[in-house]
Amino acid sequence: MEKAVRWEVQWTPREEAQLLLHHGLVLGVYSSEKADGAAQFTSAGDAFDRLVSGKLRALLSLCGPPLKKGKTRIFHGLHQDFPSVVVVGLGKKNAGINEQENWNEGKENIRTAVAVGCRQIQDLEIPCVEVDPCGDAQAAAEGAVLGLHEYNELKQKKKPVVTPQLHGSAESQAWQKGVTYAEGQNLARYLMEAPANYITPIKFAEHIEQKLRTFSNVKVHIRPESWITTQEMGAFLSVAKGSAEPPIFLEIHYLGSANKDDSPLVFVGKGVTFDSGGISLKPSSGMDAMRADMGGAATVCSAIVTAAALNLPLNIIGLAPLCENMPSGKANKPGDVVRAKNGKTIQVDNTDAEGRLLLADALCYAHNFNARAIVNAATLTGAMDVALGSAATGVFTNSSWLWTHLYEASILTGDRVWRMPLFEHYTKQVTDCPLADVSNIGKYSRAGGACTAAAFLKEFVTASHWAHLDIAGVMSNKDEVPYLRKGMAGRPTRTLVEFAARLSQDTHSAK
Protein backbone atom coordinates (compact mmCIF):
# COMPACT_ATOMS: atom_id res chain seq x y z
CA MET A 1 0.00 0.00 0.00
CA GLU A 2 1.30 3.44 -0.90
CA LYS A 3 1.82 5.91 1.90
CA ALA A 4 -1.20 8.14 2.49
CA VAL A 5 -0.75 11.81 1.64
CA ARG A 6 -2.62 14.51 3.60
CA TRP A 7 -3.54 17.89 2.22
CA GLU A 8 -2.96 20.08 5.25
CA VAL A 9 -6.40 20.85 6.66
CA GLN A 10 -7.00 20.89 10.42
CA TRP A 11 -10.31 19.35 11.56
CA THR A 12 -11.84 19.71 15.02
CA PRO A 13 -12.94 16.44 16.72
CA ARG A 14 -16.56 17.31 15.94
CA GLU A 15 -15.71 17.91 12.29
CA GLU A 16 -13.81 14.61 12.12
CA ALA A 17 -16.85 12.77 13.51
CA GLN A 18 -19.04 14.46 10.93
CA LEU A 19 -16.67 13.42 8.16
CA LEU A 20 -17.63 9.79 8.78
CA LEU A 21 -21.13 10.71 7.65
CA HIS A 22 -19.70 11.57 4.24
CA HIS A 23 -18.32 9.33 1.53
CA GLY A 24 -14.96 8.03 0.51
CA LEU A 25 -14.07 8.42 -3.15
CA VAL A 26 -12.14 6.14 -5.52
CA LEU A 27 -10.77 7.78 -8.67
CA GLY A 28 -8.82 6.22 -11.52
CA VAL A 29 -5.71 7.49 -13.27
CA TYR A 30 -4.17 6.05 -16.43
CA SER A 31 -0.53 5.21 -16.93
CA SER A 32 1.39 8.00 -18.57
CA GLU A 33 2.97 7.32 -21.96
CA LYS A 34 6.15 8.93 -20.64
CA ALA A 35 7.97 7.98 -17.45
CA ASP A 36 7.81 11.55 -16.15
CA GLY A 37 4.47 12.44 -17.71
CA ALA A 38 1.61 14.17 -15.93
CA ALA A 39 -1.28 12.16 -14.49
CA GLN A 40 -3.99 11.23 -17.01
CA PHE A 41 -7.21 11.33 -15.04
CA THR A 42 -10.48 9.76 -16.06
CA SER A 43 -13.37 12.14 -16.75
CA ALA A 44 -14.47 11.85 -13.11
CA GLY A 45 -10.91 12.46 -11.92
CA ASP A 46 -10.58 15.58 -14.05
CA ALA A 47 -13.90 16.91 -12.73
CA PHE A 48 -12.88 16.35 -9.12
CA ASP A 49 -9.50 17.96 -9.69
CA ARG A 50 -11.24 21.06 -11.04
CA LEU A 51 -13.54 21.01 -7.99
CA VAL A 52 -10.51 21.22 -5.67
CA SER A 53 -8.77 23.84 -7.84
CA GLY A 54 -6.10 21.49 -9.20
CA LYS A 55 -4.87 20.35 -5.79
CA LEU A 56 -5.24 16.64 -6.62
CA ARG A 57 -3.05 16.85 -9.71
CA ALA A 58 -0.53 18.96 -7.82
CA LEU A 59 -0.31 16.45 -4.98
CA LEU A 60 0.08 13.51 -7.35
CA SER A 61 2.97 15.22 -9.10
CA LEU A 62 4.68 15.71 -5.74
CA CYS A 63 4.32 12.06 -4.75
CA GLY A 64 6.86 10.55 -7.09
CA PRO A 65 6.52 8.67 -10.38
CA PRO A 66 3.12 8.06 -12.00
CA LEU A 67 0.96 5.35 -10.45
CA LYS A 68 1.38 1.88 -11.89
CA LYS A 69 -1.55 -0.44 -12.51
CA GLY A 70 -3.32 -1.41 -9.28
CA LYS A 71 -1.19 0.90 -7.10
CA THR A 72 -2.79 3.60 -4.97
CA ARG A 73 -2.28 6.87 -3.19
CA ILE A 74 -4.62 8.18 -0.50
CA PHE A 75 -5.33 11.86 0.10
CA HIS A 76 -7.15 13.17 3.16
CA GLY A 77 -8.92 16.48 3.62
CA LEU A 78 -9.15 17.59 0.00
CA HIS A 79 -12.91 18.13 0.09
CA GLN A 80 -15.39 18.20 2.95
CA ASP A 81 -17.77 15.77 1.26
CA PHE A 82 -14.99 13.23 0.69
CA PRO A 83 -12.75 12.95 3.76
CA SER A 84 -10.56 10.41 1.98
CA VAL A 85 -9.84 10.08 -1.72
CA VAL A 86 -8.07 7.01 -3.11
CA VAL A 87 -6.43 7.44 -6.50
CA VAL A 88 -5.66 4.12 -8.17
CA GLY A 89 -3.71 3.21 -11.30
CA LEU A 90 -5.73 1.80 -14.23
CA GLY A 91 -2.87 0.87 -16.53
CA LYS A 92 -2.97 1.84 -20.21
CA LYS A 93 -5.85 4.05 -21.26
CA ASN A 94 -6.76 2.16 -24.43
CA ALA A 95 -6.24 -1.39 -23.17
CA GLY A 96 -8.72 -3.74 -24.84
CA ILE A 97 -8.86 -7.44 -25.68
CA ASN A 98 -5.56 -9.16 -25.03
CA GLU A 99 -5.47 -12.14 -27.37
CA GLN A 100 -2.59 -13.72 -25.49
CA GLU A 101 -4.49 -13.59 -22.20
CA ASN A 102 -7.96 -14.29 -23.69
CA TRP A 103 -9.67 -11.47 -21.81
CA ASN A 104 -10.47 -7.78 -22.03
CA GLU A 105 -7.49 -6.28 -20.27
CA GLY A 106 -9.12 -2.89 -19.82
CA LYS A 107 -12.09 -4.39 -17.96
CA GLU A 108 -9.81 -6.51 -15.77
CA ASN A 109 -7.67 -3.47 -14.93
CA ILE A 110 -10.77 -1.56 -13.83
CA ARG A 111 -12.09 -4.45 -11.69
CA THR A 112 -8.73 -4.80 -9.95
CA ALA A 113 -8.15 -1.08 -9.43
CA VAL A 114 -11.61 -0.40 -8.04
CA ALA A 115 -11.45 -3.41 -5.70
CA VAL A 116 -8.11 -2.22 -4.28
CA GLY A 117 -9.43 1.31 -3.81
CA CYS A 118 -12.66 0.23 -2.11
CA ARG A 119 -10.80 -2.00 0.34
CA GLN A 120 -8.65 0.93 1.39
CA ILE A 121 -11.77 2.98 2.09
CA GLN A 122 -13.05 0.02 4.13
CA ASP A 123 -9.82 -0.01 6.13
CA LEU A 124 -10.52 3.64 6.98
CA GLU A 125 -13.96 2.59 8.30
CA ILE A 126 -15.83 5.00 6.04
CA PRO A 127 -19.30 3.47 5.53
CA CYS A 128 -19.88 4.54 1.93
CA VAL A 129 -17.62 4.85 -1.10
CA GLU A 130 -18.36 6.56 -4.39
CA VAL A 131 -16.65 4.90 -7.33
CA ASP A 132 -15.36 6.46 -10.52
CA PRO A 133 -16.93 4.50 -13.44
CA CYS A 134 -13.51 4.61 -15.14
CA GLY A 135 -15.09 4.46 -18.59
CA ASP A 136 -16.81 1.12 -17.89
CA ALA A 137 -19.33 1.34 -15.06
CA GLN A 138 -20.24 -2.35 -15.20
CA ALA A 139 -16.63 -3.44 -14.68
CA ALA A 140 -16.21 -0.83 -11.94
CA ALA A 141 -19.29 -2.09 -10.11
CA GLU A 142 -18.11 -5.68 -10.39
CA GLY A 143 -14.72 -4.72 -8.94
CA ALA A 144 -16.32 -2.85 -6.05
CA VAL A 145 -18.91 -5.46 -5.06
CA LEU A 146 -16.63 -8.47 -5.58
CA GLY A 147 -13.68 -6.78 -3.92
CA LEU A 148 -15.53 -5.87 -0.72
CA HIS A 149 -17.19 -9.27 -0.21
CA GLU A 150 -15.96 -11.43 2.63
CA TYR A 151 -17.63 -14.32 4.43
CA ASN A 152 -17.69 -13.37 8.12
CA GLU A 153 -21.18 -14.58 9.06
CA LEU A 154 -19.95 -16.58 12.04
CA LYS A 155 -17.37 -14.14 13.44
CA GLN A 156 -18.03 -11.76 16.30
CA LYS A 157 -15.51 -9.26 14.96
CA LYS A 158 -16.47 -8.21 11.45
CA LYS A 159 -15.01 -5.77 9.00
CA PRO A 160 -17.04 -2.57 8.65
CA VAL A 161 -19.72 -2.73 5.99
CA VAL A 162 -19.02 -0.39 3.09
CA THR A 163 -21.65 0.45 0.50
CA PRO A 164 -20.27 1.23 -2.97
CA GLN A 165 -22.11 3.78 -5.11
CA LEU A 166 -21.55 5.18 -8.57
CA HIS A 167 -19.83 8.58 -8.60
CA GLY A 168 -22.08 10.60 -10.89
CA SER A 169 -25.16 9.37 -12.73
CA ALA A 170 -24.14 9.09 -16.39
CA GLU A 171 -23.72 5.30 -16.40
CA SER A 172 -26.20 4.20 -13.74
CA GLN A 173 -27.76 1.41 -15.83
CA ALA A 174 -24.38 -0.20 -16.58
CA TRP A 175 -23.39 0.22 -12.92
CA GLN A 176 -26.51 -1.60 -11.72
CA LYS A 177 -25.89 -4.41 -14.20
CA GLY A 178 -22.40 -4.83 -12.79
CA VAL A 179 -23.76 -4.87 -9.23
CA THR A 180 -26.21 -7.61 -10.21
CA TYR A 181 -23.52 -9.72 -11.89
CA ALA A 182 -21.22 -9.38 -8.87
CA GLU A 183 -23.96 -10.12 -6.35
CA GLY A 184 -24.67 -13.32 -8.27
CA GLN A 185 -21.05 -14.43 -7.91
CA ASN A 186 -21.07 -13.39 -4.25
CA LEU A 187 -24.11 -15.61 -3.66
CA ALA A 188 -22.14 -18.57 -5.01
CA ARG A 189 -19.16 -17.57 -2.85
CA TYR A 190 -21.41 -17.43 0.23
CA LEU A 191 -22.86 -20.90 -0.42
CA MET A 192 -19.45 -22.43 -1.11
CA GLU A 193 -17.72 -20.83 1.87
CA ALA A 194 -20.34 -21.63 4.51
CA PRO A 195 -19.65 -24.67 6.71
CA ALA A 196 -21.18 -27.96 5.61
CA ASN A 197 -23.30 -28.16 8.77
CA TYR A 198 -24.85 -24.80 7.81
CA ILE A 199 -25.37 -25.60 4.11
CA THR A 200 -26.83 -29.10 4.03
CA PRO A 201 -28.73 -30.29 0.94
CA ILE A 202 -32.09 -29.08 2.24
CA LYS A 203 -30.67 -25.77 3.53
CA PHE A 204 -28.99 -25.13 0.18
CA ALA A 205 -32.29 -25.70 -1.64
CA GLU A 206 -34.23 -23.51 0.78
CA HIS A 207 -31.69 -20.69 0.47
CA ILE A 208 -32.03 -20.66 -3.33
CA GLU A 209 -35.81 -20.89 -3.06
CA GLN A 210 -35.81 -17.85 -0.79
CA LYS A 211 -33.68 -15.88 -3.26
CA LEU A 212 -36.13 -16.64 -6.07
CA ARG A 213 -39.35 -16.17 -4.11
CA THR A 214 -40.05 -12.67 -5.38
CA PHE A 215 -39.97 -13.60 -9.09
CA SER A 216 -43.37 -14.50 -10.51
CA ASN A 217 -41.86 -16.24 -13.54
CA VAL A 218 -39.80 -18.71 -11.48
CA LYS A 219 -40.92 -22.04 -10.05
CA VAL A 220 -38.76 -23.96 -7.59
CA HIS A 221 -39.28 -27.66 -6.88
CA ILE A 222 -37.45 -29.21 -3.93
CA ARG A 223 -37.67 -32.92 -4.73
CA PRO A 224 -37.32 -35.34 -1.77
CA GLU A 225 -35.67 -38.76 -1.68
CA SER A 226 -38.97 -40.51 -2.49
CA TRP A 227 -39.19 -38.58 -5.78
CA ILE A 228 -35.55 -39.38 -6.59
CA THR A 229 -36.35 -43.06 -6.05
CA THR A 230 -39.36 -42.97 -8.40
CA GLN A 231 -37.10 -41.41 -11.04
CA GLU A 232 -34.80 -44.44 -10.74
CA MET A 233 -31.73 -42.30 -10.12
CA GLY A 234 -29.75 -45.20 -8.75
CA ALA A 235 -26.32 -43.64 -9.25
CA PHE A 236 -27.27 -40.49 -7.30
CA LEU A 237 -28.92 -42.50 -4.51
CA SER A 238 -25.91 -44.79 -4.18
CA VAL A 239 -23.80 -41.80 -3.11
CA ALA A 240 -26.46 -40.25 -0.88
CA LYS A 241 -27.14 -43.43 1.12
CA GLY A 242 -23.80 -43.14 2.95
CA SER A 243 -24.94 -40.00 4.80
CA ALA A 244 -27.55 -39.34 7.48
CA GLU A 245 -28.49 -36.15 5.55
CA PRO A 246 -31.27 -36.98 3.08
CA PRO A 247 -30.64 -36.09 -0.58
CA ILE A 248 -32.52 -33.36 -2.42
CA PHE A 249 -33.02 -32.84 -6.13
CA LEU A 250 -33.44 -29.11 -6.71
CA GLU A 251 -35.28 -28.14 -9.89
CA ILE A 252 -35.68 -24.50 -10.98
CA HIS A 253 -37.75 -23.22 -13.90
CA TYR A 254 -37.12 -19.64 -15.00
CA LEU A 255 -39.51 -18.58 -17.76
CA GLY A 256 -38.02 -15.39 -19.13
CA SER A 257 -38.92 -15.84 -22.79
CA ALA A 258 -42.03 -14.24 -24.24
CA ASN A 259 -42.87 -17.72 -25.49
CA LYS A 260 -42.98 -20.00 -22.47
CA ASP A 261 -42.70 -23.03 -24.76
CA ASP A 262 -39.32 -21.99 -26.19
CA SER A 263 -36.66 -24.64 -25.70
CA PRO A 264 -34.77 -23.84 -22.49
CA LEU A 265 -31.12 -23.62 -21.65
CA VAL A 266 -30.59 -26.34 -19.04
CA PHE A 267 -27.96 -25.85 -16.33
CA VAL A 268 -26.92 -28.86 -14.25
CA GLY A 269 -24.72 -28.49 -11.16
CA LYS A 270 -23.00 -31.04 -8.96
CA GLY A 271 -24.24 -30.48 -5.41
CA VAL A 272 -22.11 -32.50 -2.99
CA THR A 273 -22.43 -30.32 0.12
CA PHE A 274 -19.57 -32.19 1.79
CA ASP A 275 -17.24 -34.71 0.18
CA SER A 276 -15.24 -36.90 2.54
CA GLY A 277 -14.42 -39.25 -0.32
CA GLY A 278 -16.62 -41.96 1.16
CA ILE A 279 -14.94 -45.33 1.78
CA SER A 280 -12.12 -44.13 -0.51
CA LEU A 281 -11.48 -41.54 2.20
CA LYS A 282 -9.65 -38.31 1.36
CA PRO A 283 -6.58 -37.23 3.37
CA SER A 284 -7.55 -35.15 6.39
CA SER A 285 -5.37 -32.21 5.34
CA GLY A 286 -7.52 -29.79 3.41
CA MET A 287 -10.66 -31.89 3.67
CA ASP A 288 -12.52 -28.93 5.17
CA ALA A 289 -12.42 -27.28 1.72
CA MET A 290 -14.72 -30.03 0.48
CA ARG A 291 -17.61 -28.03 1.91
CA ALA A 292 -17.36 -26.29 -1.47
CA ASP A 293 -17.77 -29.48 -3.51
CA MET A 294 -21.24 -28.18 -4.33
CA GLY A 295 -19.63 -25.35 -6.31
CA GLY A 296 -21.26 -26.54 -9.53
CA ALA A 297 -24.72 -26.29 -7.99
CA ALA A 298 -23.84 -22.98 -6.32
CA THR A 299 -22.67 -21.36 -9.55
CA VAL A 300 -25.50 -22.55 -11.81
CA CYS A 301 -28.21 -21.70 -9.25
CA SER A 302 -26.64 -18.30 -8.62
CA ALA A 303 -26.50 -17.72 -12.37
CA ILE A 304 -30.25 -18.38 -12.57
CA VAL A 305 -30.93 -16.00 -9.67
CA THR A 306 -28.91 -13.38 -11.57
CA ALA A 307 -30.68 -14.11 -14.86
CA ALA A 308 -34.02 -13.57 -13.11
CA ALA A 309 -32.82 -10.30 -11.58
CA LEU A 310 -31.72 -9.14 -15.04
CA ASN A 311 -34.98 -10.37 -16.57
CA LEU A 312 -33.07 -12.14 -19.36
CA PRO A 313 -35.43 -13.06 -22.24
CA LEU A 314 -34.90 -16.81 -22.35
CA ASN A 315 -36.10 -19.90 -20.52
CA ILE A 316 -33.65 -21.60 -18.15
CA ILE A 317 -34.01 -24.80 -16.17
CA GLY A 318 -31.62 -25.51 -13.32
CA LEU A 319 -31.03 -29.00 -11.93
CA ALA A 320 -28.97 -29.66 -8.80
CA PRO A 321 -28.64 -33.13 -7.24
CA LEU A 322 -27.69 -32.40 -3.61
CA CYS A 323 -26.23 -34.81 -1.06
CA GLU A 324 -23.20 -35.60 1.07
CA ASN A 325 -20.55 -38.23 0.31
CA MET A 326 -19.79 -39.92 3.60
CA PRO A 327 -18.33 -43.25 4.80
CA SER A 328 -20.74 -45.50 6.69
CA GLY A 329 -22.09 -49.04 6.76
CA LYS A 330 -24.51 -48.03 4.01
CA ALA A 331 -22.00 -46.27 1.77
CA ASN A 332 -20.84 -47.40 -1.66
CA LYS A 333 -17.89 -49.79 -1.55
CA PRO A 334 -15.16 -49.96 -4.19
CA GLY A 335 -16.26 -52.51 -6.76
CA ASP A 336 -20.01 -52.00 -6.21
CA VAL A 337 -22.18 -51.77 -9.33
CA VAL A 338 -25.08 -49.32 -9.49
CA ARG A 339 -27.65 -48.57 -12.20
CA ALA A 340 -28.17 -45.06 -13.60
CA LYS A 341 -31.45 -43.54 -14.76
CA ASN A 342 -30.82 -44.50 -18.40
CA GLY A 343 -30.28 -48.15 -17.46
CA LYS A 344 -26.51 -48.20 -17.81
CA THR A 345 -24.61 -49.96 -15.06
CA ILE A 346 -21.64 -48.27 -13.37
CA GLN A 347 -18.79 -49.97 -11.55
CA VAL A 348 -17.79 -47.75 -8.62
CA ASP A 349 -14.06 -48.37 -8.49
CA ASN A 350 -13.40 -45.25 -6.43
CA THR A 351 -16.05 -43.80 -4.13
CA ASP A 352 -14.27 -40.44 -4.25
CA ALA A 353 -15.26 -40.14 -7.91
CA GLU A 354 -18.83 -39.57 -6.78
CA GLY A 355 -19.74 -36.30 -8.48
CA ARG A 356 -20.02 -37.98 -11.87
CA LEU A 357 -22.56 -40.43 -10.41
CA LEU A 358 -24.84 -37.56 -9.40
CA LEU A 359 -24.37 -35.86 -12.75
CA ALA A 360 -25.05 -39.05 -14.72
CA ASP A 361 -28.62 -39.21 -13.41
CA ALA A 362 -29.15 -35.44 -13.57
CA LEU A 363 -27.95 -35.33 -17.19
CA CYS A 364 -30.31 -38.14 -18.10
CA TYR A 365 -33.17 -36.19 -16.51
CA ALA A 366 -32.10 -33.01 -18.34
CA HIS A 367 -32.99 -34.65 -21.65
CA ASN A 368 -36.71 -34.49 -20.71
CA PHE A 369 -36.91 -30.77 -21.53
CA ASN A 370 -36.09 -30.54 -25.25
CA ALA A 371 -33.15 -28.36 -24.26
CA ARG A 372 -31.60 -25.81 -26.56
CA ALA A 373 -28.35 -26.66 -24.81
CA ILE A 374 -27.27 -28.52 -21.68
CA VAL A 375 -24.40 -27.08 -19.63
CA ASN A 376 -23.20 -28.79 -16.48
CA ALA A 377 -20.71 -27.44 -13.95
CA ALA A 378 -18.85 -29.43 -11.32
CA THR A 379 -15.81 -29.35 -9.08
CA LEU A 380 -15.16 -32.73 -10.62
CA THR A 381 -11.47 -33.61 -10.70
CA GLY A 382 -8.20 -32.71 -9.03
CA ALA A 383 -6.70 -33.48 -12.44
CA MET A 384 -8.33 -30.33 -13.79
CA ASP A 385 -6.56 -28.28 -11.15
CA VAL A 386 -3.28 -29.94 -12.12
CA ALA A 387 -3.89 -29.20 -15.81
CA LEU A 388 -5.00 -25.56 -15.71
CA GLY A 389 -4.65 -24.43 -12.11
CA SER A 390 -6.87 -21.46 -11.32
CA ALA A 391 -6.34 -19.68 -14.64
CA ALA A 392 -9.44 -21.01 -16.39
CA THR A 393 -12.37 -23.41 -16.24
CA GLY A 394 -11.89 -26.50 -18.38
CA VAL A 395 -14.65 -26.99 -20.94
CA PHE A 396 -15.43 -30.30 -22.63
CA THR A 397 -18.08 -29.98 -25.31
CA ASN A 398 -19.53 -31.72 -28.36
CA SER A 399 -20.66 -28.38 -29.84
CA SER A 400 -18.48 -25.70 -31.42
CA TRP A 401 -21.49 -23.36 -31.38
CA LEU A 402 -21.78 -23.76 -27.64
CA TRP A 403 -18.05 -23.39 -27.14
CA THR A 404 -17.96 -20.13 -29.10
CA HIS A 405 -20.64 -18.57 -26.90
CA LEU A 406 -18.92 -19.67 -23.69
CA TYR A 407 -15.52 -18.48 -24.88
CA GLU A 408 -16.74 -15.07 -26.02
CA ALA A 409 -18.64 -14.59 -22.76
CA SER A 410 -15.52 -15.38 -20.75
CA ILE A 411 -13.46 -12.75 -22.57
CA LEU A 412 -15.87 -10.08 -21.34
CA THR A 413 -16.11 -11.33 -17.75
CA GLY A 414 -12.40 -12.09 -17.32
CA ASP A 415 -13.40 -15.46 -15.83
CA ARG A 416 -11.80 -17.53 -18.55
CA VAL A 417 -12.55 -20.91 -20.11
CA TRP A 418 -10.29 -23.28 -22.00
CA ARG A 419 -11.40 -26.06 -24.32
CA MET A 420 -10.35 -29.62 -23.43
CA PRO A 421 -10.55 -32.83 -25.52
CA LEU A 422 -13.44 -35.30 -25.68
CA PHE A 423 -11.52 -37.91 -27.66
CA GLU A 424 -12.72 -41.49 -28.13
CA HIS A 425 -9.30 -42.30 -26.68
CA TYR A 426 -10.68 -41.43 -23.24
CA THR A 427 -14.06 -43.10 -23.75
CA LYS A 428 -12.39 -46.48 -24.21
CA GLN A 429 -10.70 -46.07 -20.84
CA VAL A 430 -14.04 -45.89 -18.99
CA THR A 431 -16.06 -48.36 -21.09
CA ASP A 432 -13.44 -51.12 -20.86
CA CYS A 433 -14.93 -52.29 -17.58
CA PRO A 434 -14.98 -55.86 -16.16
CA LEU A 435 -18.29 -55.80 -14.24
CA ALA A 436 -20.50 -53.07 -15.74
CA ASP A 437 -21.16 -50.91 -18.79
CA VAL A 438 -18.84 -48.18 -17.57
CA SER A 439 -16.38 -47.55 -14.74
CA ASN A 440 -16.37 -44.35 -12.73
CA ILE A 441 -12.59 -43.96 -13.20
CA GLY A 442 -10.30 -44.51 -16.17
CA LYS A 443 -8.48 -47.83 -16.38
CA TYR A 444 -5.11 -46.06 -16.41
CA SER A 445 -5.86 -44.48 -13.04
CA ARG A 446 -4.54 -40.91 -12.88
CA ALA A 447 -3.67 -40.46 -16.57
CA GLY A 448 -5.91 -37.80 -18.12
CA GLY A 449 -8.24 -37.85 -15.13
CA ALA A 450 -10.25 -34.77 -16.11
CA CYS A 451 -10.65 -36.13 -19.65
CA THR A 452 -11.81 -39.61 -18.57
CA ALA A 453 -14.30 -37.99 -16.17
CA ALA A 454 -15.73 -35.99 -19.09
CA ALA A 455 -15.80 -39.14 -21.23
CA PHE A 456 -17.79 -40.86 -18.47
CA LEU A 457 -20.38 -38.07 -18.49
CA LYS A 458 -20.65 -38.24 -22.27
CA GLU A 459 -22.02 -41.77 -21.85
CA PHE A 460 -25.15 -40.18 -20.36
CA VAL A 461 -25.62 -37.46 -22.99
CA THR A 462 -27.41 -37.71 -26.32
CA ALA A 463 -28.02 -33.96 -26.81
CA SER A 464 -26.22 -32.31 -29.73
CA HIS A 465 -25.23 -29.25 -27.68
CA TRP A 466 -23.73 -30.17 -24.33
CA ALA A 467 -20.84 -28.74 -22.37
CA HIS A 468 -19.21 -29.98 -19.19
CA LEU A 469 -17.40 -27.35 -17.14
CA ASP A 470 -14.86 -28.76 -14.70
CA ILE A 471 -14.44 -25.96 -12.16
CA ALA A 472 -12.22 -27.76 -9.64
CA GLY A 473 -9.22 -25.54 -10.41
CA VAL A 474 -11.16 -22.29 -9.97
CA MET A 475 -13.01 -23.37 -6.82
CA SER A 476 -10.99 -21.15 -4.48
CA ASN A 477 -8.83 -18.03 -4.63
CA LYS A 478 -5.57 -17.39 -2.83
CA ASP A 479 -4.27 -14.25 -4.50
CA GLU A 480 -4.56 -15.13 -8.19
CA VAL A 481 -7.61 -12.96 -8.87
CA PRO A 482 -6.79 -9.64 -7.20
CA TYR A 483 -10.40 -8.44 -6.96
CA LEU A 484 -11.43 -11.53 -5.00
CA ARG A 485 -10.37 -12.01 -1.41
CA LYS A 486 -8.90 -15.30 -0.24
CA GLY A 487 -11.57 -17.99 -0.04
CA MET A 488 -14.12 -19.71 -2.23
CA ALA A 489 -14.31 -17.95 -5.57
CA GLY A 490 -17.83 -18.53 -6.92
CA ARG A 491 -16.35 -18.94 -10.39
CA PRO A 492 -17.49 -18.99 -13.19
CA THR A 493 -20.90 -17.54 -12.23
CA ARG A 494 -20.53 -14.30 -14.20
CA THR A 495 -19.41 -16.21 -17.29
CA LEU A 496 -22.50 -18.42 -17.06
CA VAL A 497 -24.70 -15.31 -16.77
CA GLU A 498 -23.00 -13.58 -19.70
CA PHE A 499 -23.28 -16.81 -21.70
CA ALA A 500 -27.02 -16.97 -20.99
CA ALA A 501 -27.38 -13.30 -21.94
CA ARG A 502 -25.61 -13.91 -25.26
CA LEU A 503 -27.75 -16.98 -25.91
CA SER A 504 -30.89 -14.92 -25.31
CA GLN A 505 -29.79 -12.58 -28.12
CA ASP A 506 -28.79 -15.35 -30.53
CA THR A 507 -31.70 -15.64 -32.96
CA HIS A 508 -29.91 -18.20 -35.14
CA SER A 509 -30.36 -21.91 -34.66
CA ALA A 510 -27.45 -23.88 -33.33
CA LYS A 511 -25.55 -25.70 -36.03
Image (cartoon, rainbow, N blue to C red):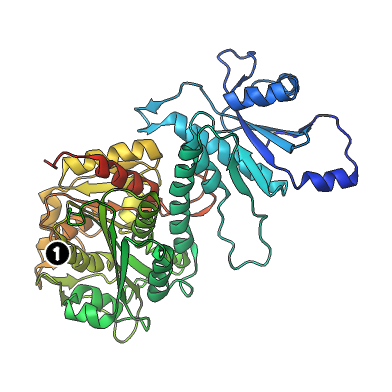
* Disc 1 residue type (three-letter): Asn
Picture coordinates of residue 130, whole percent (x, y)? 63, 39
Q: Image height check: is 147 above or below 172?
A: below
Q: Residue at x 58, y 24 (%)?
A: 43
Q: Image height check: is 411 above or below 239?
A: above
Q: Nearer the viewer, residue 86 or 468?
A: 86
Q: How would you rate the neighbour count of disc 1 (Cα within 10 Å): few for under 14, some for 14-19, many for 20 or more?
A: few
Query: Considering the image in quadrants, where does the N terminus appear?
Result: top right
Q: Which of 40 and 130 is in front in this view?
A: 130
Q: Disc 1 designates what residue? A: 368
Picture coordinates of residue 72, whole percent (x, y)? 65, 33
Tell me if I can see residue 275 in this picture.
no
Picture coordinates of residue 112, whole percent (x, y)? 53, 37
Q: Image height check: is 98 above or below 175?
A: above
Q: Which residue is drawn at 53% across and 32% down?
A: 170
Q: Image height check: is 36 above or below 422?
A: above
Picture coordinates of residue 184, whole percent (x, y)? 43, 53
